[in-house]
Image (cartoon, helix red, strand yellow):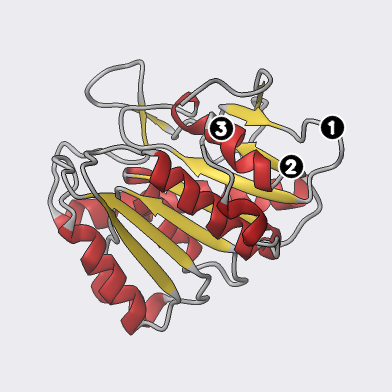
């Protein structure tokens, strides 16, 4: 992906402000015209990466959401495998049980960030979308479906639904979800997307899922294009005006 159109601003050290919640930092791209944001797109990176890994999506998504602020926080914990990266939770134990404990542990941190951003920009949940990659998808699905008020939508790239067996009892809202996964993903098996799709449908969540051909654990032009179209639809923008806009 190419670089953002302009340098990203950075979240201040007071985000979120709660003393008992880890402070998050990371890049942020405001509307290019300097106007007050009308939407918030929260970009959640995968394990071992940081906010810079996804902030360039603002270059593409900003074409359909020029009034949006794009925020890509660094996950709250240093990556177990290298101090330069971050993680939402540890994967030293990759069991289903530990992943569930991990998302539950990190959920209050992400919820605090969401609450802070909605208050900061004077917007409600209907003006916020979450875009996650890998572990960021796990976090976005877990938190987004348990918010009291529905988000505009959730995009999940190359991720999974953690604790799907609990969703029917814990789900509070049903925002539309778009899932995408490379058919050659060696990190998170593509079957995880199909499991998430089936579980979400069973819970009454509107979901679309795409298996991207010849793609590993990453994003390609198809993923970005579908993401652009989904965001446009979620925020009431004419999808036809987006379809010809290639990444």
Q: Nearer the viewer, residue 105 or 171?
A: 171
Q: What's the CA distance linking mark 1 and mark 2?
A: 8 Å
Residue positioned 15% across, 51% down in the render = 189
Vertical side of 81 occupied by 224: above or below: below
Q: Quadrant of residue 3?
A: top right
Q: Secondary structure at mark 1?
A: loop
- List x then y, in percent, for residue 46: 35, 37
Q: Earlier in the sequence, mark 3 or mark 1?
A: 3
Q: Residue furthest front?
A: 244
Q: Are marks 1 and 2 in contact (CB under 8 Å)?
A: yes
Q: Residues within 10 Å of mark 3 (few under 14, many from 20)?
A: many
Q: Residue at x 29, y 61 (%)?
A: 161
Mark 2, mark 3: which one is toward the viewer? 2
Q: Nearer the viewer, residue 74 or 204?
A: 204
Q: Earlier in the sequence, mark 2 or mark 3?
A: 3
Image coordinates of residue 200 in percent, x first then y, are 35, 74
At a point 27% along the width and 70% down the height, the residue shown is: 164
**Residue named by callout 1:** 33
Labels 2 and 3 touching (C-beta < 8 A): no
Above or below residue 205? Residue 179 is above
- The residue at the point 18 percent across, 54 percent down is 190
Residue 30: quadrant of the picture: top right
Find disc 2 in the rendering and name its residue: 66
Secondary structure beneath dot 2 equals loop
Label 2 crowd bin: few (<14), some (14–19), many (20+), radius 10 Å: some
Instruction: Please give the label number shown on residue 23.
Output: 3
Residue 220 at least partly seen: yes
**Mark 3 and mark 1: span between their CA atoms?**
29 Å
């Amino acid at each position: 992906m190419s670089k953002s159109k302009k340098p990203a601003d950075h979240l201040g050290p007071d985000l979120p402000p709660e003393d008992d919640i880890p402070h998050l930092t990371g890049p942020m791209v405001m509307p290019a015209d300097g106007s007050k944001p009308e939407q918030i797109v929260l970009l959640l990176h995968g394990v071992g990466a940081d906010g810079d890994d996804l902030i360039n999506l603002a270059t593409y998504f900003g074409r359909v959401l020029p009034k949006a602020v794009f925020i890509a926080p660094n996950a709250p914990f240093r990556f177990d495998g290298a101090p330069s990266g971050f993680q939402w939770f540890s994967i030293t134990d990759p069991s289903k049980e530990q992943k569930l404990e991990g998302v539950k542990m990190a959920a209050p941190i992400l919820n605090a960030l969401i609450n802070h951003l909605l208050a900061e920009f004077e917007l409600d949940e209907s003006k916020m979308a979450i875009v996650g990659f890998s572990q960021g998808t796990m976090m976005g699905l877990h938190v987004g479906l348990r918010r009291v008020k529905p988000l505009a939508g959730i995009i999940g790239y190359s991720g999974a639904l953690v604790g799907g067996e609990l969703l029917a009892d814990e789900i509070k809202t049903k925002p539309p979800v778009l899932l995408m996964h490379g058919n050659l993903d060696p990190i998170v098996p593509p079957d995880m997307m199909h499991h998430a799709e089936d579980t979400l449908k069973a819970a009454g969540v509107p979901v679309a899922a795409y298996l991207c051909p010849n793609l590993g654990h990453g994003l390609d032009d198809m993923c970005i294009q579908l993401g652009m179209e989904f965001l446009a639809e979620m925020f009431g923008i004419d999808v036809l005006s987006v379809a010809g806009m290639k990444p």
